[in-house]
Amino acid sequence: MGCLSDYSFGHIKVDDCTYRHDLIVFEEEILSPWIRQEGHCLHVEDLKWAIAHHPRVIVVGTGTFGGLAIPQGIVASLAAQGVTLVAYKTGKAVEAYDELVEKGEQVACCLHLTC
């Protein structure tokens, strides 16, 4: 069910497949590559695929060093739709996603794999 593991700069395993491009995971479905309007600044439109799956939580991995910026307006916009957005550097985001899945949450995970 979309188990994330072996994350390091530029790659991650989802179940038994290795990905080398940014991606979004929701249950058994994966969108890769995840291409954003601006490479290092998140826009609500960048989350359309995830939002369409009706998660209660979206976990965003901002990169190994936190290079993906998330404007505060996105958090508020999603909250108004009943969706909680949490963001961490990607290593921590992987852990947070796996914990939420284990708890049975409806969660999407959007991961920037590099900077």
Image (spheres, helix red, strand yellow):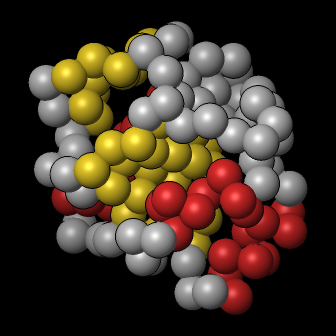
Q: Is residue 58 visible?
A: no
Residue located at (51% from left, 45% from top) = 110
Query: In the figure, 9 relative to 35: above or below?
Result: above
> Is 83 rendered above or below residue 29?
below
**What number of labels is visible?**
0
Q: Residue at x 56, y 78 (%)?
A: 83
Taking the spot 77% from the left edge, 54% from the top edge, the residue there is 43
Residue 31 appears at what percent x and percent y? Answer: 41, 42
Left-right relation of 43 to 46:
right
Residue sitting at 50 percent across and 12 percent down?
10
Closest to the observer, 32 or 113: 32
* Vertical arrangement, residue 21 with respect to residue 40, above or below: above
Q: Quadrant of the C terminus?
A: top right
Give percent across and percent down for residue 47.
60, 58
Residue 62 quadrant: top right
Q: Can I make out residue 30 in this image?
A: yes
Answer with left or right where residue 58 lies relative to residue 75.
left
Q: Where residue 41 appears, x then y in whole percent?
A: 82, 41
Residue 37 picture location, percent across and down: 77, 42
